[in-house]
RNA sequence: GGACUCGUAGCUCAGUUGGCUAGAGCGUUACAUUGACAUUGUAAAGGUCAGAGGUUCAAGUCCUCUCGAGUCCACCA
């Protein structure tokens, strides 16, 4: 044995042997199952992924305690995220997605993802993860598409799906609508304009939307405006005179501005709701290209910002602005991805009605059929579930699972808007009728299709079919071009990862471990889908781990320049050290500070483990060489012990037998506490316990006490020390798999594995 | 506005049914060590456990309030 444990030499060899011997999964015991939260297929390992270690700890611990533990891996196509990365890549080449048909774009992104995938699994392997890689599932695999489509079809049949013109948060830059959860609110100072509005003055930050106003509102109890409620006012505007209804609604804050609000249902979520309550017209004045439309007269074609400037200028000229409050601070919804302002706008969208679907989820969480660790997340997810609104699932991007809806083309040529790349590679836009009239065949349109927009007409809807496959009835259909929100598919992760027969034995799965910040996106949806499709919860425990932060507790971010690459640390100090440093001394649910010093500390611990083994092993060899000369015999031990103890009695040394009794007792207590901590997901405590025992009790105390006896070849002493040491190796193995396995093989032979033993 | 977390040694943090002298890692200081390990050992310095009040035989731990830091949700025309 070397003086030091050298991870770089040992790790790869050991991992390969696990793979070769089929130890990535076990074949005996009661099932224990974890589904790996799928990282983005094209991702590479970042510090946050380090926390997957917690799942590996569980898998290994369960393996060692006699379970058939299975960790099923997978990767996610991560719709919007990935397309965003790809579009940046396109932009560098001076191109955009509008240069491609959706088919080609999808193909290109697929290749892009394939080129960049696989890396993360290699990195996971370096961390030692005991996952059954051959079973990897990608969220665009055939069986996933099948399941996702079928779920949607079933939901539609059961009346949980509807299409509506709805106010959605639309990002003009990313070209897609976003769900509530994908928006970020930031505080910002914007000018607040006080506009003269007929007899009133009202305050707004968005004067450019005034063309879409369909009412003004006041609070029902506001004395100032009592007489106006229900009447019409005459307003002199930029486009001439018009009349406007005055409504009253509780939503109006009397203290804000002048207590009068303009209602713009098409471009403000709250106004949209108010519009519904009061049956107001929805007048859309901004199109999805981010420009004002023909309803705005001279402002048509201007982008929002330009329009605002011009409108303000013109209003000022006409004397219609009473004052401007430049110090107004409010929060603005921005895109979580690109950070630009989101535009609330009307867009046809597929929705999942969640009111009924979420009820059993709330039940299951309240009754603790699913337990959350740390506990406080139970409250948080319940809070989220309560406010969860209908879920807009349409994303106007190509990279994803296309929504299985077909619109009847025949007879609806006028009502279907589309864009496509024609044979010559030119982008064409218009109604289907216009395109056909330009001598483009339907098959040409289909193959170059970019986007199909079918607006919602409740009185006379365009006929559509919802099914896994295109209807084959001789008529022509065009498939919806929108794709599912990526959480719609990853939310069905527990429904697509197990084999059929495993739903009998491994479902519900045992633990779902994931970052706490996707609790609402993912965890709540997985529970929802599982209860809906299988009428069963998908997992028994949800273990939330927290953010990995830097040594000072700061969030890691590129702009701060404090990002730590885990693989660098693994290269320098070994996977064991890296893994242990993410667990050691960490409170449940608190941030995980990652500091190089700490990794070094754990590297030192790994070396200590190694050297305890080395010491015992060396004496084992010394003894066996000497044994022909000094055969150990019954009765001999006692004598020798008396001798050595008296010889070394400078300090007060205990008798060997007493030390051994003490050791056995202390070890029993350690193991008991360890098992308790592990079973309660208190990994940090478990590791801390063993750390303390192995280093400061076993090495510093017991080994020192028993050094002489060991050198003198006391079989009993060596046996006891070995036993305690081996047990501790097994206890440490979930945390530090490599060094424990390496020492194990020194003692038990190169072909042995600690994984075949039991704790 | 609603919910939640945190404030313990110079730094980063443990401390779970309230209970022996409040701990660890790193850092600091002194000493030791050529046969397990310098990626070491022995020891030391360093804490009014944010502050105030309360419950209790007993409070870092439970309750109330104050101050400070942070997170999530909702809203902001």
Image (cartoon, coloured by chain):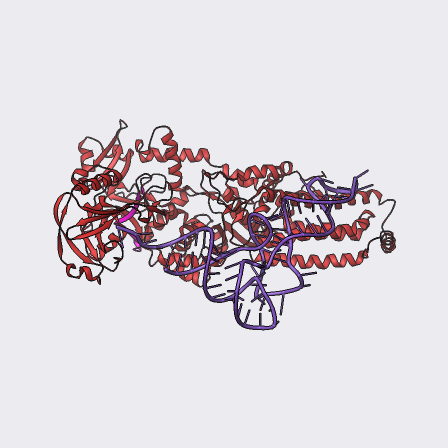
Instruction: Name the residue nearer the viewer: A281 or A303.
Output: A303
Measuring 78% from the left and 52% from the top, which residue is drawn there?
A705
Please report the residue visible at 13 percent of the width from the left and 57 percent of the height from the top: A231
In the image, taking residue A558 as reference, residue A756 lies left or right, namely right
Was residue A162 drawn as part of the magenta stretch in this picture? yes
Residue extent of the magenta highlight: A156-177
Q: Tell me, yes or no, if residue A478 can be seen here.
A: yes
User: Which sits in the foreground, A723 or A407?
Assistant: A723
Q: Which chain is red?
A: A
Residue at left offset 17%, top offset 33%? A437
The magenta stretch spans residue A586? no
On the image, the x and y values in percent for residue A218 come to: 21, 57
Residue positioned most to the top: A424
Give the image location of residue A299, x and y in percent. 19, 38
Q: Is residue A552 left or right of residue A654?
A: left
Return the residue nearer the eye: A23 or A586: A586
Q: For chain B, what colour was chosen?
A: purple
Assign the N terminus of chain A to one quadrant of the image. Answer: top right
Q: Is residue A289 visible?
A: no
């Amino acid at each position: 044995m070397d003086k030091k444990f050298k991870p770089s030499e040992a790790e790869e060899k050991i991992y390969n042997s696990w793979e070769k011997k089929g130890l990535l999964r076990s074949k005996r015991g009661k099932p224990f199952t974890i589904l790996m939260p799928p990282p983005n297929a094209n991702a590479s390992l970042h510090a946050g992924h380090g926390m997957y270690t917690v799942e590996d700890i569980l898998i290994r611990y369960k393996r060692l305690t006699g379970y058939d533990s299975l960790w099923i891996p997978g990767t996610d196509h991560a719709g919007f995220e990935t397309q965003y990365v790809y579009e940046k890549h396109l932009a560098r080449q001076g191109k955009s997605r509008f240069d491609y048909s959706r088919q080609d774009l999808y193909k290109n992104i697929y290749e892009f993802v394939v080129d960049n995938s696989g890396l993360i699994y290699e990195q996971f392997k370096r961390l030692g993860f005991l996952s059954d890689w051959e079973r990897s599932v990608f969220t665009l695999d055939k069986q996933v598409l099948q399941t996702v489509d079928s779920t949607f079809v079933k939901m539609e049949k059961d009346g949980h799906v509807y299409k509506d013109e709805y106010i959605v948060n639309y990002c003009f830059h990313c070209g897609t609508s976003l769900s509530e959860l994908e928006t970020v609110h930031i505080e910002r100072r914007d000018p607040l304009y006080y506009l003269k509005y007929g007899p009133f003055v009202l305050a707004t930050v968005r004067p450019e939307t005034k063309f879409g106003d369909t009412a003004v509102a006041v609070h029902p109890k506001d004395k100032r405006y009592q007489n106006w409620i229900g009447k019409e006012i005459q307003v002199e505007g930029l486009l001439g005179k018009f009349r406007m209804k005055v409504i009253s609604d509780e939503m109006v804050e009397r203290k804000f501005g002048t207590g009068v609000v303009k209602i713009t249902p098409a471009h403000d979520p709250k106004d949209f709701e108010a519009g519904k309550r009061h049956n107001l017209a929805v007048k859309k004045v901004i199109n999805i290209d981010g420009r004002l439309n023909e309803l705005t007269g001279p402002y048509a074609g201007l982008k929002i910002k330009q329009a605002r400037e011009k409108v303000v200028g013109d209003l000022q000229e006409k004397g219609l602005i009473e004052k401007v409050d430049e110090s107004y601070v409010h929060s603005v919804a921005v895109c979580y991805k690109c950070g630009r302002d989101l535009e609330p706008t009307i867009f046809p969208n597929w929705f999942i009605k969640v009111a009924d679907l979420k009820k059993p989820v709330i039940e299951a969480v309240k009754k603790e059929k699913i337990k959350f660790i740390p506990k406080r997340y139970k409250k948080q997810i319940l809070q989220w579930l309560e406010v969860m609104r209908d879920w807009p699932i349409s994303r106007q991007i190509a990279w994803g699972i296309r929504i299985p809806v077909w619109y009847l083309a025949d007879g609806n040529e006028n009502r279907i808007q589309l864009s496509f790349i024609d044979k010559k590679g030119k982008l064409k836009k218009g109604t289907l009728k216009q395109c056909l009239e330009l001598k483009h065949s339907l098959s040409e349109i289909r193959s170059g299709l970019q986007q199909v927009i079918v607006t919602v007409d409740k009185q006379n809807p365009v006929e559509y079919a919802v099914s896994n496959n295109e209807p084959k009835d001789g008529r022509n259909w065009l498939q919806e071009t929108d794709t599912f929100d990526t959480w719609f598919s990853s939310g069905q992760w527990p429904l697509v990862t197990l084999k059929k027969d495993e739903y009998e034995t491994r479902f519900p799965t045992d633990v779902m471990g994931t970052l706490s910040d996707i609790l609402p996106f993912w965890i709540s949806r997985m529970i929802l889908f599982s209860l809906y499709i299988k009428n069963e919860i998908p997992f028994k425990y949800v273990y939330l781990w927290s953010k990995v932060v830097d040594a000072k507790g700061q969030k890691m971010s590129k702009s701060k320049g404090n990002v730590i690459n885990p693989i660098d640390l693994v290269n320098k100090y070994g996977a064991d050290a890296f893994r242990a440093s993410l667990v050691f001394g960490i409170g449940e649910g608190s941030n995980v500070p990652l500091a190089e010093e700490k990794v070094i500390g754990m590297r030192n611990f790994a070396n200590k483990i190694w050297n305890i083994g080395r010491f015992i092993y060396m004496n084992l060899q010394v003894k066996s060489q000497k044994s022909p000369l000094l055969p150990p015999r019954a009765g001999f031990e006692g004598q020798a012990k008396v001798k050595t103890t008296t010889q070394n009695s400078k300090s007060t040394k205990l008798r060997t037998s007493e030390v051994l009794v003490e050791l056995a007792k202390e070890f029993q207590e350690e193991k008991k506490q360890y098992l308790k901590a592990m079973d309660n997901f208190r990994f940090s405590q478990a590791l801390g316990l063993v750390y303390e025992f192995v280093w400061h009790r076993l090495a510093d105390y017991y080994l020192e006490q028993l050094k002489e006896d060991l050198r003198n070849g006391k079989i009993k002493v060596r046996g006891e020390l070995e036993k305690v040491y081996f047990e501790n190796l097994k206890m440490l193995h979930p945390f530090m798999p490599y060094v424990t396995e390496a020492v194990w093989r020194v003692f038990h032979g190169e072909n042995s594995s600690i994984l075949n033993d039991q704790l």
